[in-house]
Image: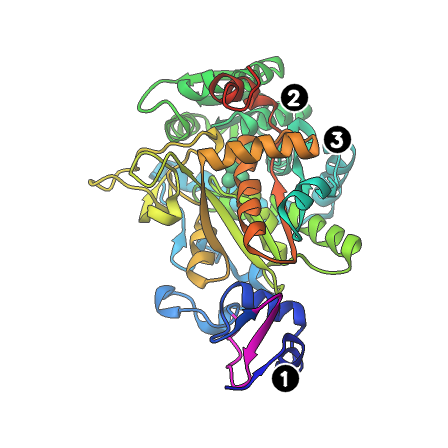
Amino acid sequence: MDYCSVLDMAKKWDISERRIRSLLIEERIKGAKKIGKSWVIPANATKPGDLRNTYQFDEVKSVEPSDIDFRSYTKRFPNEKGYFGKYGGAYLPKILEKPFQEIYDAYLTVCKSSDFIADLRKIRKYYQGRPTPVYYCRRLSESLGKVQIYLKREDLNTTGSHKPNHTMGEGLLAKYLGKKKLIAETGAGSHGTAVATAAAYYGLECDIYMGVVDMKKQAPNVARMRILGARVIPVDRGAGTLKEAVDAAFEAYSKEYKTSLYCIGSAVGPHPFPLMIRDFQSIIGTEAREQFLEMTGELPDVVCACVGGGSNSIGMFTPFLNDPVRIVGVEPLGKGKEAGQNAASMSFGKEGIMHGFNSIMLQDKDGNPGAVYSVASGLDYPAVGPEHAFLHDLGRVEYDSVTDEEAIDAFFKLCKLEGIIPALESAHAVAYAIRLAKKMHHGSILVNLSGRGDKDIDYVIEHYGEKYGIK
Ligand SMILES: Cc1ncc(COP(=O)(O)O)c(C=O)c1O
């Protein structure tokens, strides 16, 4: 058989050498092999289809092939009923249908107004401290070989995570709607802290619902929320974690919707929240794309982010959807594959409705939300946002998972090699990048570092200090 080089094939197929290398890493060129350090490709190999345009439409029945064009994707998805293909929607009790419609209508009008946009821009720049930088991890990259790892530093956003990107937007919307209170749930406390911050900034009351297990694990964030003036309401039903907190917050909002706005903590929930959260969070990817291009003159080969409900990841991914960039969402594999030992919804879940939206979720044998576990409280959620389920079906975004152990290892690596203490949630994305970098021989990975790890320090020292020689 005749073989040719990467350069020859790039010319023949009229695509860049970089794109060919990505295809080789993804093992999408049949018969290609590595001899020493160079790849050789069968001269008669067929050019792999562009995944962005060749979807399995039988899996996304409500979407016409002509709908999928990532240049106009965000304008087309979700549709006016909140559907990304078959996922999303708004499955609400009758009493909440009108309030959610009101939020959607307000969002569509207010958020496109130049006043709202100008206010939000000012808040992001002068209050949140945006743009957050993209940082090249020299020592971490060198320790792994030749792949360059970069971080989008959302840990440097005010309050130490990406959450204010949407809570400052939600708070501003509440102010425009004349609401008096913000109601929210929280898992790791990052979202709760960001809502409490927004409430203080806009002069609103604030009620945060939090599972008792998470309250214990994330005590520093509970203190921060209280100091910021929020009421933290313990939720002791069920497993006492994020899912139960969402249930409780939802119930409270049903009684107070006239005077309050529900500030959902991720790209989940009934329409219009997945849309609003994506739009507010897309500032991450928009900045990161521009910054990366400016730093390196190229786009990254891989972009990755951890996925709980999916807010930081959807914000990071959306601006890269139309680019020749591999995109990976990283879920928590916790202690293993057995039910109840992880929260890897995309790997082990199936289609179902929970918390007012249709998506992929972990379920028990009766179809109820399954038990979940992760060392990172913010990833401890039995579903993913509907847009993630859609992008997964389309084949545009890949989803993989990382265990607690890998995440903890990455946590310590980033601390020791770069002087950055990541949130345990973000450590999952770093762990994935480390794993991938060992397999790739060159190229770059841009990781969204969704938050800082101050909230996790006590827990990490108590449970892993001895193993890592700190106690
Ligand atoms: C720092 C951090 N990163 C990630 C997440 C996961 O949420 P999401 O998937 O919505 O970004 C959380 C949730 O609390 C968090 O605190």
The magenta stretch spans residue 49 = yes
Mark 3: give few (<14), some (14-19) or many (20+) Cα within 10 Å: some
Q: Find the distance from the CA under tag 2 to the CA under tag 3.
A: 12 Å
Residue closest to the eye, 352 or 328: 328
- The three-letter code of the residue at mark 1 reads Lys
Percent x, y of residue 145: 64, 50
Percent x, y of residue 89: 40, 50
Q: Residue pushed farthest left? A: 366
Q: Which residues are magenta?
A: 35-50
- The three-letter code of the residue at mark 3 reads Tyr
Residue closest to the eye, 88 or 115: 88
Percent x, y of residue 113: 69, 48
The magenta stretch spans residue 432 = no
| Residue underneath mark 1 | 12
Label 2 near ligand 1 (CB < 8 Å): no
- Judged from the image, the secondary structure of the residue bearing numbered disc 1 is helix
- Give the main secondary structure of the magenta stretch: loop
| Residue underneath mark 2 | 200
| Residue underneath mark 3 | 127
Q: Give the mark, 2 or 1, whose residue is nearer the N terminus.
A: 1
Q: Find the distance from the CA under tag 2 to the CA under tag 1.
A: 59 Å
